[in-house]
Image (cartoon, coloured by chain):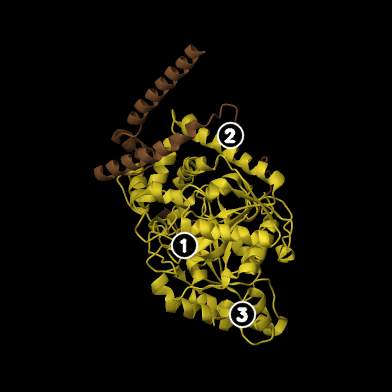
Chain colours: A brown, B yellow
């Protein structure tokens, strides 16, 4: 009994240590730069530092979710039990073509125009 | 006395008797906006000309056919993340500066059908991310009760405009408390309906599984009237639900004898400030005097709601806001190549809070962390939903404070994201569970002198009982008659 109790404590401690290591690795400045790239954001060095600290605090706060045992819990993506909503495949009126370009920064010949994609 | 001290019903009687015209109502609104606009700063876009034109059209209808529509001639304002054709819609973001919508949101079509008068677009936290409206890319909005304090957020402009008597009602949106918290801070009534009750078509998406549009008003009855106008199934929003919409006015009798009311102990302990708790406990007493049965219960997982929410909402936001790339709409900042253009556009266009949440969401969804954060948060969401399901087996409504504090001072929490997030600790569980919740005025806090909001939460699609309880409380207290001096 005592032995198994000790074993649990030890395992628990190892888990904690694991998490601490992960926490340190988690929001490094390098990682912030990578996340920013994935998010299509450009950050100054100062911003990288600020966001690294803030994001780490927020992630650390989110860690409390691990206090809960959710092994057998089904995740909720949507609160109502709606199934796929389908409709008949019939054409219906939509926004006029010229309207679609009304707010576009750049367009030409009925197409959105963007900077060079292929080098 | 302002015309806007009347309810919509009363104003319709005055219109019917020809004692006032629609133009009188519109002028009252425009005049008030010009009078307090600089002090309060509710509006991002004022539609003086459009409103006047609409008013004179409606006056013609009034003289020929009488009152046509449940909101006939009533001046209202719209949160700036709801698409309004012919009126800019920017989500208070520089990235969407000047954006001119090519279609109306479904709620706008429905409001227009009821012949309301649109006064303009209301300030908010950029893309609805925030609890104080300080994250607006354009301006500060101040609390009409004390202009050193925040109006709450993200629907801060919507709350301040109603509280200061600039409009009779407004629409807000609520993802984690963005209607109820500002309603509480500004001493008005704000309803977040059941998820799926109101179409989200034309609401710029922040967190699609949580967002709901709802009405903000001075009184419970007016609130229900607006909700009745905007509710209903819409085939343009596949998450809108085909449930019948009851006439909410029928339940407003003031009689709540035997109503079973749950008071979660987690909602009156912890970080809830004394001045808030005091007013809430008085409200509990009032419910008992009215014949309701109030019992203490537990929502054991509510303490985890905020953490789960920020993971889920930010994840959804990181995907939803990917569309703002300077290609189809918004301000573009040129770059050498496509990726550089994206980056420059988004970095200059978005404010810090939006960047923070996009990055948090991108991180939570990235490979290696998805299970640990996103999936975990969704599992906790299930637990929170189950907490409510269990309570509603035995109770009609849940009551508690809307926010743990009254309105805080401008600038106090701007650079403290976690402190700011804690404002929503009592409203977030309601969004995660998808149930309806309202905030009604509940007196003034003794320390700050600022309004306290009482939150009343109901079961899925049971806005009716929420309104019934809210109306009885309002009639028994008349806190809604309290107005800020401006």
Q: Nearer the viewer, mark 1 or mark 3?
A: 1
The answer, for residue B85, to whether it is visible in the render is no
Secondary structure of the residue carrying tag 3 is helix
Residue A99 coordinates in the image, percent (x, y): 51, 59
Residue placed under numbered mark 3 in the picture: B57
As displayed, is residue A30 above or below residue B157?
A: above
Q: Residue under mark 2: which chain is it in?
A: A
Query: Label 1 vs label 3: CA separation?
Result: 31 Å
* Residue at figure coordinates x 51%, y 56% from the top left: B277
Mark 2 neighbour class, 10 Å CA radius: few under 14, some 14 to 19, many 20 or more? some
| Circle on res. B206 | none
Q: Nearer the viewer, mark 3 or mark 2?
A: 2
Mark 3 neighbour class, 10 Å CA radius: few under 14, some 14 to 19, many 20 or more? some
* Residue at figure coordinates x 50%, y 55% from the top left: B403
Q: Residue under mark 3: which chain is it in?
A: B
Query: Label 2 vs label 1: CA separation?
Result: 32 Å
Secondary structure of the residue carrying tag 1 is helix
Query: Label 3 vs label 2: CA separation?
Result: 52 Å
Is residue B75 toward the left or the right of residue B130 in the image? Answer: right
Q: Are marks 2 and 1 on the same chain?
A: no
Residue B94 coordinates in the image, percent (x, y): 38, 58
Screen quadrant of the N terminus of chain B: bottom right
Furthest residue in direction bottom, as rendered: B19
| Circle on res. A75 | 2
Is residue B375 toward the left or the right of residue B333 in the image? Answer: right
Residue placed under numbered mark 1 in the picture: B156
């Amino acid at each position: 009994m005592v032995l198994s109790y000790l074993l649990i404590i030890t395992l628990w401690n190892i888990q904690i240590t694991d998490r601490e290591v992960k926490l340190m690795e988690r929001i490094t400045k390098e990682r912030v730069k990578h996340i920013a790239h994935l998010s299509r954001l450009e950050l100054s060095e100062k911003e990288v530092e600020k966001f690294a600290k803030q994001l780490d605090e927020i992630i650390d706060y989110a860690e409390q979710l691990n206090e809960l045992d959710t092994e057998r819990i089904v995740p909720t993506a949507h609160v109502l039990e709606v199934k796929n909503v389908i409709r008949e495949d019939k054409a219906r009126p939509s926004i006029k073509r010229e309207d679609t370009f009304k707010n576009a920064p750049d367009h030409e010949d009925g197409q959105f125009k963007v900077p060079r994609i292929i080098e | 006395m302002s015309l806007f001290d009347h309810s919509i019903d009363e104003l319709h009687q005055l219109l019917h008797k020809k004692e006032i015209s629609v133009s009188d109502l519109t002028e009252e609104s425009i005049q008030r906006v010009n009078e307090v606009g600089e002090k309060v700063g509710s509006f991002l876009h004022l539609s003086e000309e459009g409103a006047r034109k609409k008013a004179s059209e409606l006056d013609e209808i009034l003289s020929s056919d009488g009152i046509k529509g449940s909101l006939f001639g009533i001046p209202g304002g719209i949160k700036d993340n709801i698409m309004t054709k012919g009126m800019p819609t920017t989500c208070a973001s520089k990235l969407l500066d000047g954006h001119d919508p090519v279609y109306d949101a479904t709620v706008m079509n429905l409001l227009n059908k009821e012949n309301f008068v649109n006064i303009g677009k209301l300030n908010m936290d950029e893309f609805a991310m925030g609890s104080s409206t300080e994250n607006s890319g354009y301006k500060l909005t101040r609390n009409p009760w004390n202009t050193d304090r925040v109006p709450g957020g993200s629907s801060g402009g919507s709350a301040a405009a109603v509280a200061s008597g600039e409009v009779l009602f407004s629409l807000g949106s609520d993802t984690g408390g963005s209607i109820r918290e500002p309603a509480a801070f500004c001493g008005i009534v704000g309803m977040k309906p059941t998820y799926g009750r109101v179409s989200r078509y034309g609401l710029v998406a922040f967190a699609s599984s949580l967002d709901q549009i709802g009405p903000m008003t001075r009184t419970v009855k007016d609130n229900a009237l607006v909700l009745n106008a905007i509710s209903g199934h819409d085939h343009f929003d596949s998450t809108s639900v085909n449930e019948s919409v009851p006439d909410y006015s029928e339940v407003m009798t003031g009689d709540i004898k035997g109503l079973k009311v749950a008071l979660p102990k987690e909602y009156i302990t912890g970080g809830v400030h004394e001045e808030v708790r005091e007013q809430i406990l008085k409200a509990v007493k009032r419910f008992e005097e009215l014949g309701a049965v109030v019992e203490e219960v537990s929502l054991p997982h509510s303490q985890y709601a905020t953490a789960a929410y920020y993971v889920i909402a930010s994840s959804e936001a990181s995907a939803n806001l990917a569309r703002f790339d300077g290609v189809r709409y918004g301000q573009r900042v040129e770059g050498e190549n496509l990726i550089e253009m994206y980056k420059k556009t988004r970095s200059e266009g978005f404010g810090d809070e939006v960047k923070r949440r996009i990055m948090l969401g991108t991180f939570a969804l990235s490979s290696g962390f998805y299970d640990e954060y996103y999936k975990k948060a969704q599992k906790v969401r299930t637990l929170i939903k189950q907490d409510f399901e269990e309570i509603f087996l035995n109770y009609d409504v849940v009551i508690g404070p809307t926010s743990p504090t009254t309105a805080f001072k401008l600038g106090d929490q701007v650079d403290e994201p976690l402190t700011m997030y804690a404002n929503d600790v009592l409203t977030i569980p309601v969004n995660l569970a998808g149930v309806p919740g309202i905030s009604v005025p509940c007196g003034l806090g003794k320390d700050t002198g600022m309004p306290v909001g009482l939150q009343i939460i109901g079961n899925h699609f049971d806005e009716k009982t929420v309104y019934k309880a809210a109306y009885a409380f309002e009639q028994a207290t008349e806190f809604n008659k309290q107005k800020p001096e401006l």
